[in-house]
Image (cartoon, rainbow, N blue to C red):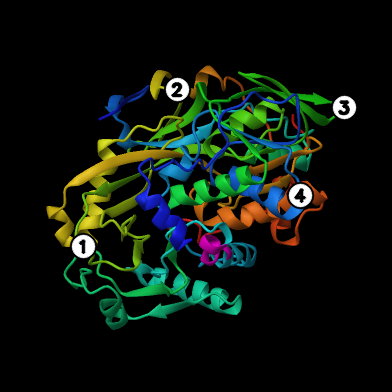
Amino acid sequence: MKLLTCPLNGQRNISEFTYGGEYHPMPDPHSTDARQWAEYVFFHDNAAGLVTEWWCHTASSFWFLAERNTISDQIIRTFEASEIFNQRIDFAENPQ
Amino acid sequence: MPFGLLKYGLSNEYPAQHHFTPATELKKHYDVVIIGAGGHGTAIAYNLAKYHGITNVAVLEKSYLGGGNTARNTAVIRSNYLTEEGVSFYRESVKLYNNLSNEFNYNVMMENRGQLTLAHSDAAIRSFRWRAEVNQHMGVRSELVDRQAIAELVPNLNMSEDSRFPIMAGLWHADGATARHDAVAWGYAKGACDRGVELHQLTEVEDIEIDKGRVTAVKTNRGRIECGAVVQAVAGASSVVAKKAGIPLPIHCYPLQAMVTQPYKPILTPHVSSPHVHVYVHQTSRGEFVIGGGSDPYPLYHTRATLDQRESLSAAAMELFPFLAQARMLRQWAGTTDMTPDYSPIMGVSPVENYYLDAGWGTWGFKATPICGVTMAELVATKKVPEIIKPFALERFYNYEQINEAGATAASH
């Protein structure tokens, strides 16, 4: 069985986790047009090699990030989302 | 022909028939370079040569002919899709398949055995009614069938009402079929090579040269080739190859695993699939039971087989056909499926002039091979996108015009 290390719950069977898609930096919601949103939402690097992606520990609903090699199927490292998301994103029309 | 066969039989030498061009040096220039010698790539080359008179064509293959997903798919041919765009496209493909052996004068072992999809819930019955109505409207033979009809179609199916998920109804698709997948690629490649197309195996495209938004050459491990047009038909490697041309694609690659038993006496005629228990089973003309349809739960460019899939596919297959518990497994394998978000392919022009895309074939590539060859060749030869593939343009993702093909896989989604 393949194991994945959850930053919150430790090493668990990978069947306890749900893959959540590639991590991409989100474009600025205030200056992004429909075409750029389409690219952000639908298009993927789909790289053969090292990728950064979202995973969720299904049982505890804990979302985190993982670095994984898509050729060798090796998980390089997992880390909490707070490593990347360290400031608040404001979606309001006129951000304060 | 019978005399030729007799002469061949009485000869002491049994001269080998060369199906394909022997490896030659690459030329400096080709009118069309096709990347990928699977079913799709060779079908495009065949149609270019036979129907459009374009024979200065090279089909480049990094490995060997038909060794990718053409070899790895489970050879299911059907057209019982859900969207109008999908049904009319795959319907034409099934028609072409029915005449393919004649077209090639080469036996692709087409067998019209029909396909049965099982419903184990009320929700599935509702969606099957919907699919049957769409299919019939579009001239495809699909109908909702009850338990009695199912028992008659597949006498050895487990119809017990005490099973974990009892079978409630089915979608019977009389047009469903199977064919020898390797022979499809071989037939196309032979027909193309007979007309002057060059097949270059062990020739990997390393870079794609673009000048002023137009493709001009490809660099390979065997040298540089100038070209008028390029078609990429590389399935699991779609994103990787398109990236060399600077084209992002909405694709994620997942391994799809299948397995096959040792050969047994013929007892199962149609192809049987169950979206609910996530499996499909059919018996090949050699007698092996093909058990398929398990996607890995996360993207990967690795074609290893896993115990997880072996367990879940076996459990599901045994639920439908309990006698399979006695069967011995022969092989288990995976193919890299290039999945699109809407389960429809990406065909047509790209942002690079004269660079054509034939990608996003996920789990539905084999059944589309003949129509793909016809339409992509027409596009390359005439530079006009055939009406039937217009909806599958890459541009649909930018315009939010996806085609949600919920009938694309054996699994419901």
Whether residue B40 can be seen here: no
Q: Label 1 crowding class (10 Å Cα cut-off): few <14, some 14-19, many 20+?
A: some
Q: Which label lies toward us, 4 or 1?
A: 4
B205 versus B193 height, above or below: above
Quadrant of residue B223 within the rendered picture: top right
Chain ID for label 3? B
Name which residue type carries label 2: Arg
Residue pointed to by mark 1: B321
The count of marks equals: 4
- Secondary element under disc 1, as helix, strand or loop, is loop
- The lab-note entry on whether marks 4 and 3 share a chain reads yes
Name which residue type carries label 3: Lys
Name which residue type carries label 4: Gly
Chain ID for label 1? B
Q: CA distance from mark 3 to mark 1?
A: 59 Å
Q: CA distance from mark 4 to mark 1?
A: 50 Å
Q: Which residues are magenta?
A: B96-102
Residue pointed to by mark 4: B53
B287 versus A77 height, above or below: below
Residue pointed to by mark 3: B212
